[in-house]
Image (tube, rainbow, N blue to C red):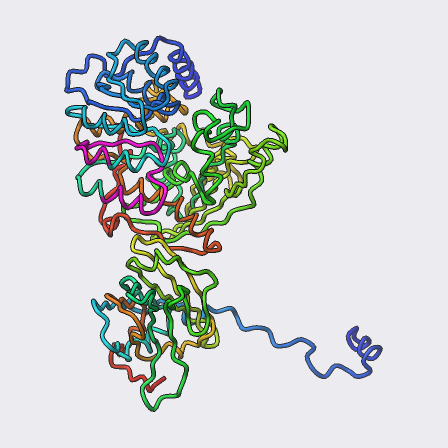
Amino acid sequence: MNRREFVRTTSLTAAALTVLPEKTLFANYAGEKLKIAMMGVGLRGQNHLALILKRDDVELVAICDVEPRMLEMAKAMITKSGKPMPRIYTGDNYAWKKMLQQTKDLKSVLIATPWEWHKPMIIGSLEAGVKYVATEVMLGITLQDHWDVVQAAEKHDAQVMMLENVCYRRDVLAVLNMVRQGLFGEITHLQGGYQHDLREVKFNDGVKSYGGGVEFNEKGFSEAKWRTNHSVHRNGDLYPTHGIGPVAQCININRGNRFLKLSSFATQSRGLHKYIVDHGGENHPNAKVKFRLGDIVTTTIQCANGETIILQHDTNSPRPYSLGFRVQGTDGLWMDVNNSIYVEGKSKPHQWDNAKEWLDKYDHPLWKKYGNDATGAGHGGMDFFVIHAFIESAKRGTPTPLDVYDAAAWSAITPLSEQSIELGNETIDFPDFTSGKWMNRNAVFALNDDY
Amino acid sequence: MQRREIFNILFKGTPPNELDTSEPEPVIETPAYLINEGTLPFFKAWKSLPEVVESGLLPQLTKYEFSLKFGAGNLETPEGLSGISLRIGVKDAGLPALNEITLGVNAAGYLFIGDLQSKSKIHYDKLIEDLQFILEVKPQPYGKSYAKLKLVDQIGLTLAILKSEQFSQENWVGAFSLNRGQFHFLQLEGRFASEGNQLLTTNISEY
């Protein structure tokens, strides 16, 4: 069987698996099950819930949410899975505290709530004795929030892992594999971002999750209920972690390297207002809302070892999705927008290679081992890996591969970029959340096919 | 007859007797102050600021980029907000009377370097926390200097930045001392030429 036939066959197998009955991971698992509770079972939380319900090494003991509709959807998923129904906490914004108080021997918590709840829920969990906390992306809102979480994790000697799933994207991991094998030489420049038309996420009709109206805040549903308000009041890179996480791994940020300084620039804010006028008319009350968030925010970061990074946040304009990755070194580069790779001495001079052959060749051991298990999981399978890494770390009592320092450094780009713009696009210093430990820490992320 | 001579006769009336273009620029060279080769890093920290800090330190450091980082307590006093400032480049007697430089935050809450003042006012709440000033000075061509003063709060968030090109490198040479307010640490970082190990013994009068 040649390579082409192999790829075709495995693709067909993968496609077949998606229509097979859901299989269970770690079936007949004999070890002690990991007790986990979930704060937030909205649409994002339900992605994680589906993965947790597939695993036999995890016991879901409690869930918590304030939205009755979301809770009903989550309960239906649990019933369908055949797993025992966990205790359910709801009723007010602090039901999660009651859940922490009343749940005995809770070892881990998974948080998938609006950004502003992440910090109090992380710290609340740590103070309740939980040693493994997984949180959806964004650690906090202000820079102080980030320090608070770092210091709480240090104080309680606990693991806080931000579920940055793009670090596990198949092409991203293959490129990391290439970087580590020196294919691109010494890395000098990286790019990434979050370039995703979120207009139908930021606005809906209050019933559907996406689009259909121009409502947000109290009249919106799901993310429109809370996320859009950040675009009203803030101007900066509001969602940096999908872009920065993968490139940070390529240059060992917090492990021999660190972010030193950044500057940000924002365009004028047009897209969200235009969307409201186009879809709701100029007399719609929301047409009067003044959005602060620039349509495209560009941030440049300088690293201690000399590399530069450009991040772009672009969520208010019509455009196809792209994270805009570029990883460039002294010997070549990868760009995901044109799906191309160039390696000096191996590619034809001045001509791009189609990235696919390189990415197949350097497919990461994690994907080779778990590719089939990841099939059908959210966001092209990467959700599987990030949850898998968290659960395996918690089961084994080892540090999570993405830790609180990674979370803080990646997420703090938001308040720092806001401050840079506020000061007239000044270059501002990046705090060292590791307090100097970055100089001696070793890389731990995705070193093998374990987790 | 050459083409140039014809043109000169027609339009100028005299044969060419001088170059009509200026001397070419010399080959591009990196300015000396940007070459770190052969220099050594320098770092010195004081836990509390002595009355006057060593005047012999700066002469060599000012040849290259250097930075001063100084930590201050909060600026609140029973009478209201107090200013805080540092004098740099204080000259010994007998030296040319160059302007010394005063910088810091004034009582109104504005960052200043000499007579230059930041445009935006720093929020009062921020000035009653622990603060840190970072001064970065970079040499520029023809003996000029580029100074950047940043005010950073206790968690590392930059609150204000002020830049100045009004001082020469020589202005920075000299002792530095506290002018107003209280500091609890000071760090001086830079580079100096390795030859002769003269850093701490350099006589300021050489400048």
Quadrant position of the N terminus of chain A in the picture: top left
Q: Name the quadrant containing residue B108.
A: bottom left
Q: What stretch is highlighted in magenta?
A: A124-151
Can you see residue A64? yes
Can you see residue A343? no
- Image point (44%, 33%), residue name: A227
**Along the line of sight, the residue nearer the viewer: B114 or B107:** B107
Asked if residue A388 lies in the magenta stretch, the reply is no
Q: Where is residue A91 in the image (x, y as percent from the top left)?
A: 31, 23
Q: Position of residue A130 (x, y in %)?
A: 19, 31
Q: Is residue A420 shown left or right of residue B26?
A: left
Asked if residue A149 lies in the magenta stretch, the reply is yes
Residue at far bottom of view = B94
Q: Name the quadrant containing residue B184.
A: bottom left
Q: Is residue A47 shown left or right of residue A26?
A: right
- Image point (24%, 12%), residue name: A84
- Image point (60%, 73%), residue name: B24
**Along the line of sight, the residue nearer the viewer: A186 or A319:** A319
